[in-house]
């Protein structure tokens, strides 16, 4: 489903060239759940962005849903993303001028889904935001925005969900509810989950844990066997 082959990510800064990720090899199968863990600055968000085709590698390749991303231009990558992937960003990235409901409806409307509103309402109810549908992101708490972002990510029934700290802004009870929801969808719809998290309890519930240290993958554990 997603594969990284000898991936290197390098950026140019004022003080010269900086290698953020190096020699990353990994493979995540359809229906699997994987947690990417590591200290702040280890390169987790960067890796997630590369795997999702939101960013491009400096060397190596990413294969997403059978396609080699380095062979595609931005339009080609956008097309694969639209068909297969859902995202929950570390910074939510909700559209400020749209209400919670409209934010969740947007990806469905882009696919001309007639049931856009009905489905968006259902999803917002599922994340516990029934009473907040007509609020704008600026009128929502961080955790509420997080939940809108999660509802939006699930809207188009992606075959793979990428989530950067999906429970980072949530209290324990709400976080647990969201985790249960993620794994429910993983089970029911066979959605592949790739999660960045600091939460070891969440990581332990994933099939696999990938640990990044200073831009390198140092440990891969199979949680089912461990
Ligand atoms: N565009 C960029 N230009 C320069 N440096 C960058 C860029 N993007 C990321 N970095 C650096 O690369 C490193 C990895 O960043 P990344 O956001 O992937 O870390 P992270 O593991 O997600 O951290 P956190 O847990 O704090 O979210 C950091 O040191 C960051 O400062
Ligand atoms: Mg990050």
Image: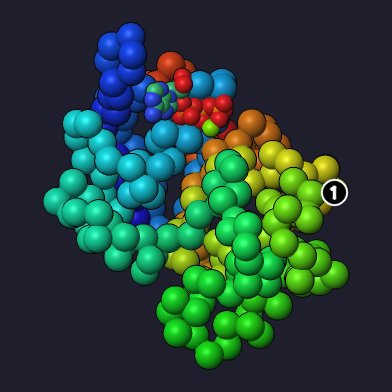
* Residue where numbered disc 1 is placed: 173
Observer able to see residue 103: yes
Few, some or many C-alpha atoms within 10 Å of disc 1 (few <14, some 14-19, many ≥20)? few
Please provide percent x and percent y for residue 78. Answer: 31, 60
Depth check, front residue: 73 or 51? 73
**Whether residue 50 is situated above or below residue 122 in the rendered picture:** above
Q: Is residue 9 left or right of residue 35?
A: left
Q: Farthest residue in the left direction?
A: 71
Depth check, front residue: 58 or 208? 58
Q: Is residue 194 left or right of residue 16?
A: right
Q: Is residue 161 left or right of residue 47?
A: right
Q: How is the image coloured?
A: rainbow
Q: Farthest residue in the top direction?
A: 15
Observer able to see residue 184: no
| Residue at x 69%, y 39% (from the top left corner) | 168
Determine which quarter of the picture holds residue 144.
bottom right
| Residue at x 56%, y 21% (from the top left corner) | 39
Please provide percent x and percent y for residue 88. Answer: 56, 51
**Whether residue 206 is situated above or below residue 184 in the rendered picture:** above
**Whether residue 116 is situated above or below residue 127 in the rendered picture:** below
Depth check, front residue: 198 or 77? 77
| Residue at x 27%, y 40% (from the top left corner) | 56
Determine which quarter of the picture holds residue 21.
top left
> Which quadrant does the N terminus fall into?
bottom left
**Whether residue 34 is situated above or below residue 150 in the rendered picture:** above
| Residue at x 18%, y 46% (from the top left corner) | 70
Please provide percent x and percent y for residue 109. Answer: 50, 79
Q: Secondary structure at mark 1?
A: helix
Q: Is residue 134 left or right of residue 155?
A: right
Tally of marks: 1
Please provide percent x and percent y for residue 226. Answer: 57, 33
């Amino acid at each position: 489903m997603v594969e990284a082959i000898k991936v290197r990510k390098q950026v140019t800064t004022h003080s010269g060239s900086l290698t953020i990720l190096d020699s990353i090899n990994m493979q995540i199968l359809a229906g699997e759940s994987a947690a990417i863990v590591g200290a702040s600055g280890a390169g987790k968000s960067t890796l997630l962005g590369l795997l999702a085709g939101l960013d491009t590698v400096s060397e190596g390749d990413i294969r997403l849903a059978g396609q080699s991303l380095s062979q595609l231009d931005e339009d080609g990558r956008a097309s694969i993303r639209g068909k297969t992937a859902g995202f929950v960003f570390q910074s939510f990235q909700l559209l400020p001028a749209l209400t919670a409901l409209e934010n969740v409806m947007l990806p469905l409307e882009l696919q001309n889904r007639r049931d856009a509103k009905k489905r968006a309402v259902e999803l917002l109810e599922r994340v516990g935001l029934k009473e907040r549908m007509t609020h704008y992101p600026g009128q929502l708490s961080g955790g509420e925005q997080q939940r809108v972002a999660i509802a939006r990510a699930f809207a188009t029934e992606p075959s793979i969900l990428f989530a950067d700290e999906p429970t980072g802004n949530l209290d324990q009870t709400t976080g647990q509810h969201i985790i249960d929801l993620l794994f429910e969808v993983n089970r029911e719809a066979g959605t592949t989950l790739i999660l960045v998290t600091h939460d070891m309890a969440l990581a332990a519930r994933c099939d696999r844990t990938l640990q990044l240290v200073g831009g390198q993958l140092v440990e891969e554990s199979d949680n089912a066997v461990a």
